[in-house]
Structures are given as structure tokens and as C-alpha cells.
Amino acid sequence: MSQPLHIVILAAGEGTRMKSAKAKMLQSLGGQPLLTHLLETAMTLKPEGIHVVVGAGSEAVRDACASYEVDWVQQEERLGTGHAVMQAMPRVPDGATVLVLLGDTPLIPTDLLHVMVDEYRAPLALLTMELDDPHGYGRILRDPGGNIIGVIEHRDAEPHQHAIREVNTGIIMADSERLRGWLGRIDCDNANGEYYLPDVFSLARAENGEIQGILAPDASDLQGANDRAQLARLERRLQQRRAAGLMAEGAQLIDPARIDIRGRVEVGRDVLIDVNVVLEGDVHLGDEVMIGPGAVLKDCDLAAGTRVLAYSVMEGVTTTGACDIGPFARLRPGTELSAGCRVGNFVETKNARLGEDSKASHLSYLGDSEIGSGVNIGAGTITCNYDGANKYRTVIEDGAFIGSDTQLVAPVTVGRNATVGAGTTVTRDAPADALTVSRSRQTTIEGWKRPTKDR
Ligand code: UD1
Ligand code: CA
């Protein structure tokens, strides 16, 4: 295709059937606003311009898509798909090719669009699909020779036309001057009183132009997103694709139907992901990383050999070597674990760095902490990092041993190889190589009797 490409995306729909306070284009699909899927697909075609037609209440849509370079076109009144394309045409020069996409069809596969653009024959082409239940769609009309002669909307069709299973996907390509001419001639004389984009087909045909039909191989990629049930089906479709992508990269998914990817995931060799794992944001999993069942990871970068056991919830975590996490660990942003670390069940960390071979195996809170290597944190250790107004750091140097049920009242430092006795409340620095303990001495009262109930 030699002419410059301009993409027009129709996205002025209100999405009434979602019954939502949010615009349809902002409904979440795969963890991102619906419209962003089409924008990303459109960008792979490297067009000269992407013109997005939006309607009332579009500010939120523009804000949510602010990071994309698009030309926003306002359609003040929703007068039909033909009218919507007309609003964008002043931004499209003559001598260009226009590709119209529907905000309605967010998961159109990139490779299908590339085929369409490569095989496009001027002046007009449309993408069709075959449906077992074509109800509601515009039907493709062909003459006895098989040439496309028009599209008839479901509401305007005769009963015998309802049997036609080949339908309009709504995705068309056309030469810009010709399209401008046809759009200037369409009217709203139909069951909906709208300016229909598909009316350009009969106008083109009347000029004896050939209309190229491209049949999409798989209609399930072109399903609409009109209500919650359809949105859920699209979500499954997208997740299937993302799971297939991860497997193609070499990841072992125990069940590709039971993983949810809501962001970008990169995997090394022999990564294993068990069932019901949710991955969000940017997740990088090094070679032989294992993610146990039910784990939720957001924006994590895990070094080769890291094992995340069942039901751990992690956000903003980096491991710089193989370590063991969970089950039931809660690692919050700013957690950095070095090789050989172990953070076990019911341990919460935040802004905490653990050096090599340090362990917090059970029931602890480590916040705003700098922990050296070879440190053992006993069960029930709590860093008291917050005084209700400010946060303070706890430093635990290499080789220290923190006994169970210790409170470290920050700011405080535990020196190298120091030992803190179980049950200690550390309020001042604990010196290196020594035992620090704050605990009242144990006494035994001989012959003491338990109270008994009064009769
Ligand atoms: C449209 C086609 C139909 C096709 C179907 C495929 C028309 C008249 N019919 O029907 O042939 O089979 O798509 O899904 O084109 N929009 C605007 N402004 C408007 C009207 C619509 O931006 O004034 C946008 C909508 O947000 C939506 C898209 O255009 O993304 C399609 O509009 P919709 O009303 O859903 O058309 P359908 O009745 O589904
Ligand atoms: Ca629709």
C-alpha cells in the first residue's frame, strides 16, 4: 500500500448496556481501559494519524489514554456510524487510505489487520465474518456472481435476509477522497434514523466499483463488548491469547485457563506457573522461577531460581538471587531480597532490604528496614517503624540473631553478630557481638492455687 494510512476509531458509544457510571471505552479489559487495546493494535500499523471519535463525557476517556498520541475528534450528537466517520474526515487528507475500526471490537488481532492492509484493493474493502447467530448484525448482500453489493442492517432487513450468516464486522478500508464523496451522499432514511456507514457500499456499487470482501478466519476475535457478559467473554479470549503467548515464550502453565495476566510479563527459561495466579503491571520472571497456586504479583522482578509458594501477595518486589517466598507472604513495595533469602508465612515486608541468606520464616513485620546478610529474624518480630506521624529505619547488621517476639522500636540499629533475646523490646541500639535482652526475670510461686468458682 503506497498511500499514507489514517485510522479512524469509532468510540462515541455510551455503553448503556454496561449499566455503569464509567464510559464503555474505560471498562477494564485485561487490566487496562478497553480503548487502549485498539490504540495499541492501531499503532502497530504505523499510520500517519489515529483519529478517535468520542462523544459526550469524553474527558475521562482522553485522560485515561493521555499517554497515546492520538487525534481526538468530538462527535457532539450520536447520529450514526456514517456521521461519526464524517466528523473525522476533515483531519484526513486526500490521497490517503482510511481504515475504520470500531471501539466495539477491541480485540481484533494485529495480524488480521496487517493482512487486511497488505491485501487491500482500492477503492473500498470490508472485513466480514460468518456467525452461527447473526442476530443484530448488518448482513452482507452479494449478487449471483458473488460480488458484494451492499450491507443491510438487521432492523432494516427482510425476513429472508435474516438467514444470511455473513455479516459486517464494521471494519472497512477506503480511499479518502472516494469515502468523503460517498459520506456526503448518505442519508438517515432507515429504521434507526441514523447515518449508516455501511450505506457507502451501495453507493460504491452504484458507481460500478468493486468492493473487496475479506473474510475473518475466526469470528471469536471480533466479538463486541456491549454488556457485561460480552465483556467477560472478551476477557477470557484475551487471557487465552496471553497465556498462549507465555507458553510460546517457554513458560509452563499448569492450566492456561487458570491464569490472569493484567500487564506485561517477561519470562526466562523453564518458568513454572501454577493455577490461579494473577500477574499485574510489569512482571519479569527469571529462569526457573516457580510461582505457586493463588499467588498475586504486581510489578515484580524475580531473579532466576526464585520460588514463590502458594497464596503470596507481592507488589514492587525485586529479588537479586534465588530465594524462597511464602506460602502466605505479603511483600509490599520496596522489598528487595538477595540470594538465599527466605521470607515465610505471614511475614509482611515494606521498604525492606534483606542481604544474602537472611531469613524471616514466620509471622513478622519488617518495614523501613536494612537487613544485612546471614540474619535470622525470629517469629513474631515487629519493626515499630511508625510513631503515628513519622517513619524511621531499622538497621540489622550481618549475622545478627533476633529472638522471637522482639519489637524493634525504630530508629534503632542491631550490630553485627548481635543476639537479641526473645521477647525483647529494643529501644536503644543493640551492640555487636553481644546479647541484648529486656525481659523481667522469670519467677515461680510454689503452692499457688488457681481460683475456683464460688458455689
Ligand atoms: C454496526 C454496523 C453493522 C455491523 C456491526 C458490527 C452500522 C450502521 N452498522 O452496527 O453493520 O454488523 O456494527 O459490530 O454501522 N459509534 C459512534 N458514533 C455513532 C454511532 C456509533 O462513534 O454515532 C460507534 C460506537 O461507539 C461503536 C461503533 O460505532 O463503537 C458501532 O456502533 P453501533 O451502534 O454499536 O453499531 P451496531 O448497531 O453494532
Ligand atoms: Ca455494536
Image: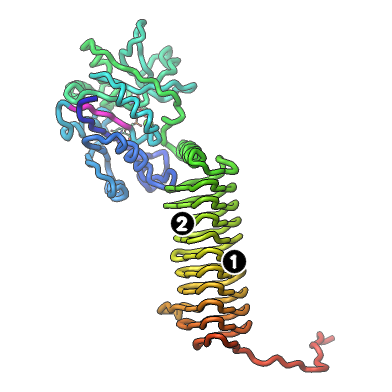
- The residue segment tinted magenta is 96-101
**Residue flagged by tag 1: what amino acid is it?**
Phe
Whichever of callouts 2 and 1 sits on the residue coming sooner in the sequence is 2
Which quadrant of the render holds ligand 1? top left
Residue position for label 1:
346
* The residue at label 2 has a CB less than 8 Å from ligand 1: no
State how far apart marks 2 and 1 are (Cα): 19 Å
Quadrant location, the C terminus: bottom right
Residue at figure coordinates x 59%, y 61% from the top left: 326
In the rendered image, residue 148, in percent from the top left (x then y), is placed at 33, 13
Residue position for label 2:
300
Residue at figure coordinates x 42%, y 41% from the top left: 18
Question: Which element carries disc 1, helix, strand or loop?
Answer: strand
In the rendered image, residue 235, in percent from the top left (x then y), is placed at 47, 40
In the rendered image, residue 218, in percent from the top left (x then y), is placed at 45, 26
Which quadrant of the view contains residue 108?
Answer: top left
Work out which residue is located at the far top of the displayed protein and give it. 144
**Mark 2 or mark 1, which is nearer to you?**
2
Disc assigned to residue 13: none
Residue at figure coordinates x 83%, y 93% from the top left: 447
